[in-house]
Amino acid sequence: MREDTAQELDSELEPPVRMEEESEVELQVEDEEPEVMKQPEQPPPCLSEPNTQGIIKGSDLFGYVGIEAVLDQMRRKTMKAGFEFNIMVVGQSGLGKSTLVNTLFKSKVSRKSCTPNHEEKISKTVHLQSVSHIIEEKGVKMRLTVIDTPGFGDQINNENCWEPIVKYINEQYEKYLKEELHVNRKRRIPDTRVHCCVYFLPATGHWLRPIDVEFMKRLGNIVSIVPVIAKADTLTMEERLEFKQRVSGRSSATDLLVTYDLSWAEKTKWGIIEVENVAHCEFAHLRDLLIRSHLQDLKDVTHNIHYETYRVRRLNESNANGLGLSALSLENGTAEKSEAESQL
C-alpha cells in the first residue's frame, strides 16, 4: 500500500514540473523574439548599388556595348571631310611675319612665298590679302588660310589703321551668319572666320606703343589674339622679361592668350640661333599652342564666344528695327523663287 501511494504521489507531482518547463521555454522564446524583430531585414543580394542618377558605369554593364567606337567614327569622318583653320598675322613690315608662318607649317604658305616676283612695297593703306592651301599630313587634311595685313603700322599717321582689320573680321562673321539663315542652307557652311590673330610687337626700348595697346583693345573682343615679340634677340634677358611682363599685365583687359618672344634661326658673329631650340627662343611653345594642343580650342572660342556674341548683337539689331531675319538673309533661294513667280 505504501508503494502504491508513493507511486500515485509521484505521478501527481510530475505534470506540474513539465508545465513549469514548458512555461520556461515559452518565456525564453518570447524573450528571444524581440531580439529577432530588432534586426533589420536585409535586402536581396544584388551586383551593385542602385543608381539614382541615371549613370551606368562600365562595371554595371553586363557585357561590351561598343560606345567607345564612336570616337573612331568621328575620327574617320573628320579625316574624310577635313577641317579649316584661318590665321591672321598683323604687324609692321620687316618683323618676320612670312618667316613665322612658313616655319610654323614647314612649307611656303605665306603671301610673299606664293607670289612670283614679289616686290615689297610700303602700302599707303592697310590692304588685307589671304592665301589658302590644302595641307595633308598622315591622312588628315586641313585647309589653311593665311590673312596678311600689309601696310599696318608703316605710316607716319597710323590713326584708325585697325579699322580695315575689324571690318574684315566682322564681314566674315556676317557671311557665316547669312549662310546659317538660309532656308536651304549648305550641309557644311564654309568657315572663313578668323580663328587666331598673331600680333607682332617690335622689340624696341619704347615697350608697348599706343598703337599696340589700342589694337589689342579693339580686337580683343572679336578675335583671339596671340602677341609675339619679334626679333627678341636684340633685347637682353632682363629687357625681354620686363617686356613680357608688361604685355602679360594687359592680358585681363585685352583677352590675350599668351605671350611669346621669337628670334629666327640665323647665323651671327656670336653663334647660331636655332628656332627649334627652346633655350634660344620660344617658337616651339608657340607652335604647340597654335597647332598641336590648342588649335581646336581656338576654333571653339571663335564659334562659341566671338561669333555667338556677334550673332546675338545682329539679331537684336534686326529685331529692334522691326526687320526680322529677312533683313539679314542674302541671296536666299526661296526668296528669289517667290520673286520670280510673282513676276510671272
Image (spheres, rainbow, N blue to C red):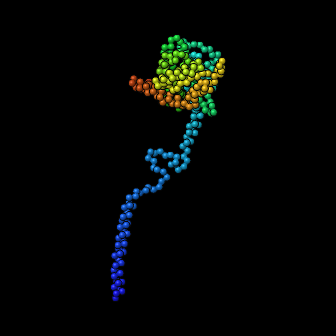
Q: Nearer the viewer, residue 101 or 313?
A: 101
In percent of width and height, residue 62 lies at 53, 50
- Give the position of the N terminus as an image quadrant: bottom left
- Asked whether, in this view, residue 17 is left or right of residue 280, the answer is left
Furthest-bottom residue in this view = 1
Question: Is residue 327 shown left or right of residue 98?
Answer: left
In the drawing, does residue 60 fall left or right of residue 38? right
Visible residue check, residue 105? no
Q: Nearer the viewer, residue 139 or 277?
A: 277
Q: Residue at x 40, y 58 (%)?
A: 39
* Residue situated in front as seen by the camera: 35 or 93: 35
Q: Quadrant of residue 81?
A: top right
What is the count of numbered marks? Answer: 0
Where does the image place residue 180, in percent across and percent down from the top left? 48, 29
Q: Residue furthest top?
A: 156
Q: How far across and how far down the image is residue 108, in percent?
A: 63, 23
**Residue 290 occupies which quadrant of the picture?**
top right
Residue 136 is left or right of residue 5, and the answer is right
Residue farthest along the front direction in this orientation:
2
Between 184 and 62, the residue placed more toward the observer is 62
Tell me if I can see residue 319 in this picture. yes
- The residue sitting at 62% across, 30% down in the picture is 136
Task: Give me the residue at 33% from left, 82% from top.
Answer: 9
Q: Tell me which corner region of the image, top left, top right, bottom left or bottom right, holds residue 289.
A: top right
**Residue occupying image coordinates x 38% and y 64%:** 32
Q: Could you say where residue 296 lies in the image, as x and y percent from the top left?
A: 54, 31
Up/down of 154 relative to 277, above or below: above
